[in-house]
Amino acid sequence: MQSPVELGIGVLAALAIILAATGVCGGLVQTVGQPRVVGEMIAGVVLGPSVFGVVLPSIQQSVFTPDIKSVLYVLSTIGLTFFMFLVGAGIDHRFLNRRSIRRAAAVASCGIIVPLALGAGTGLLLLDRLAGPGASAAEFALFLGAALAVTAFPVLARILQERGMTSTPLGSLTLVAAAIDDASAWVLLAVVAALGAAGAASGVLVTILGAALLVVGMLTAGRRLLRLLVRRVELTGAMTHGSVVVVLLVVVGCGWFTDMIGIHSVFGGFIAGIALPASPVLRRELTTRLTDVNAVLLMPVFFVFSGLNTEVAGLLDVSLALPLVLLLVVAFVGKYVGCALAVRLHGFSWRHASAVGALMNARGVMLLIFINVGLAQGVIGQQLFTILVLVAVVTTASAMPIYRASLPVSCEDAERATGDRLDAAGPPTVPTADTVRTITLTERKELA
């Protein structure tokens, strides 16, 4: 047990190493067209026992002691919660109507059902080899299916932010679908936890009712109260100390509530952001005050924390090659095909459908959270944990190339222009296959 002074010094040293590693890896992957978040995930694996722990084991263990890892976990949870708050606050409310939410729910449903069924079936095949100690067949199969159904909500949001696509019809559809997808996956995780604890089935009902209560409360009474804060900020043109305190309390309170009912705090942060009334002044102030420290310092901490639990050396076992390939194929096909078909059936072009399928297929942060819970509860073992870390990295790394091939810059420009032309009182327009063809023909004429 480290003293408070030793712990403080140790945490600062660990943060310095994390910043250096994620900064270097993030910059390197950007040179090959990948989002920075992929490099941060790789940095986490590098700083873990698989690389740093092999090259300099004594130093690695002294830098990342159990006490320091506990502090890093707390910091990463805070960072994820506030990141998702900023994402929710940045969504254009013009796209949050009944029609768009129905579309998003349909996309999310297909993105859950298909990989859930495939993953659960695969779980039954791998039960004897990779299940955790004491996990039942139903518990293990449902957990693996839910893990493969999850979408990396923060990663997806970060990609859309980097591409300037958050406030577009396509971006908003994808973000809301990912939110519904992940909320459903966490409910499934609650079911898994209930299966593993006798008499805990009532916890599932508490989770569902609690989430519904938070969403309804924040989008009705909560939004009305927050409107008073927005008016004051718009009158002064800046956030006062008191305004910042109120916003932080709302985010922390929502995150605490969702954690208490069995859903990760990131969803509480996202709901708090969605409930915040649209205001360019408030959005600018929040971005200025929260974004840099959160994205540069707190978010990368989580990737490193997950990397500290990853043993890549265990995959040298030849018998694990088949499960790894099988899970990669099931993960990719289930999510991509399910989401792409749903988007296409709702009037979008094949290009848009493929782009959404690629983005929804990224699992990064959320899968890492998911499997950390599964490992702690004994549902999965260390070997499957490591396999699923690689699934998270590969599916997330594949998202950007497929997205860019599906939706080139010209199509992104057209999508952003569609969002800019929308009147706040008007319904969102849906780019269809005909729209994309018209835009493409027009651009060809201009180039000629």
Image (cartoon, rainbow, N blue to C red):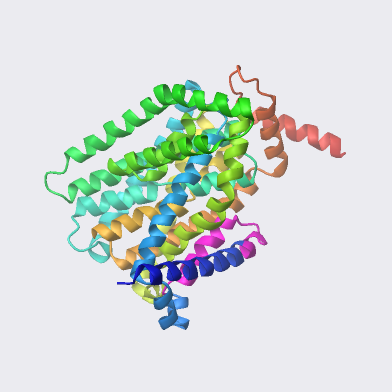
Magenta segment? 27-49
Res 336 visible: no
Q: Residue visible at 38% across and 50% down?
A: 148
Examine the rendered structure and indicate whether residue 322 appears above or below residue 123. below
Give residue 334's position: percent from left, percent from top: 42, 47
Residue 98 appears in the rendering? yes
Residue 359 horizontal side relative to residue 254, left or right = right
**Magenta run includes residue 47:** yes
Give whichever of 278, 308 is nearer the camera. Answer: 278
37 sits left or right of 212 in the view: right
Q: Quadrant of the N terminus?
A: bottom left
Picture quadrant where residue 308 is located:
bottom left
Q: Residue at x 35, y 53 (%)?
A: 370
Q: Most extreme residue toward the right, as rendered?
A: 448
Asked if the stretch drawn in magenta spans residue 99, the answer is no
Quadrant for residue 376, please give it.
bottom left
Query: 376 or 140: which is nearer to us?
Result: 376
Residue beneath the point at 29% across and 33% down: 210
Q: Quadrant of the C terminus?
A: top right
- Expressed as whole percent of the image width and height from the top left, the position of residue 163 reads 64, 45
